[in-house]
Image (cartoon, rainbow, N blue to C red):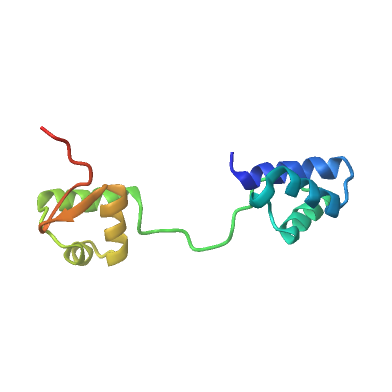
């Protein structure tokens, strides 16, 4: 479990015990030491739990969802790359009408490949 989630559970527990924000923060410092939340974060979570919040995890944030790095695009890049392993990232991005950075992320992170001597190969090579 993530450290901050453990601390949030601890803050929630302290709120149920009717501890003050200062007492809660001091207990967090004693329990978690250097990994402790800041006092302002501790006070913020303490207030949210006092106001009735039950959920410890963060709420979903507003923002633009990723539309380029989808399973379909990973498949398209993979098929194109396996048809010609010497193709550049720039050429693939032009052919697939995707941003160059997205194609590079797909190749390096999703397909786990890297470029060696002008040819994309799997990142982990095995000895034969």
Q: Nearer the viewer, residue 26 or 86?
A: 26
- Quadrant including the C terminus: top left
Give the total number of marks visible in the rendering.
0
Measured from the top left, where is residue 38 in percent x and y?
70, 58
Residue 116, located in which quarter of the rendered image?
Answer: bottom left
Measured from the top left, where is residue 110 in percent x and y?
31, 48
Measured from the top left, where is residue 74 in percent x and y?
28, 50
Q: Nearer the viewer, residue 47 or 80?
A: 47
Q: Nearer the viewer, residue 38 or 84?
A: 38
Give left or right: position of 52 versus 114. right
Image point (68%, 48%), residue name: 33
Image point (84%, 45%), residue name: 15
Image point (18%, 41%), residue name: 125
Measured from the top left, where is residue 48 in percent x and y?
78, 53
Residue 85 visible, this orientation: yes
In the rendered image, the residue lying farthest to the top is 128
Image point (17%, 36%), residue name: 126
Q: Nearer the viewer, residue 34 or 48?
A: 34
Residue 100, located in which quarter of the rendered image?
Answer: bottom left
Indicate whether 2 appears above or below 84. Answer: above
Give left or right: position of 64 versus 46. left
- Quadrant including the N terminus: top right
Residue 55 visible, this orientation: no
């Amino acid at each position: 479990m993530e450290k901050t989630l453990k601390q949030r559970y601890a803050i929630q527990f302290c709120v149920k015990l009717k501890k003050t924000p200062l007492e809660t923060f001091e207990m967090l410092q004693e329990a978690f030491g250097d990994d402790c939340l800041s006092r302002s974060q501790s006070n913020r979570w303490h207030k949210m739990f006092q106001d009735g919040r039950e959920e410890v995890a963060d709420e979903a944030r507003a923002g633009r969802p990723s539309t380029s790095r989808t399973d379909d695009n990973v498949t398209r890049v993979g098929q194109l790359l396996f048809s010609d392993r010497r193709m550049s990232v720039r050429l693939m991005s032009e052919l697939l009408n995707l941003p160059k950075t997205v194609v590079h992320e797909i190749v390096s992170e999703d397909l786990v490949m890297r470029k060696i001597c002008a040819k994309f190969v799997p990142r982990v090579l095995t000895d034969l």
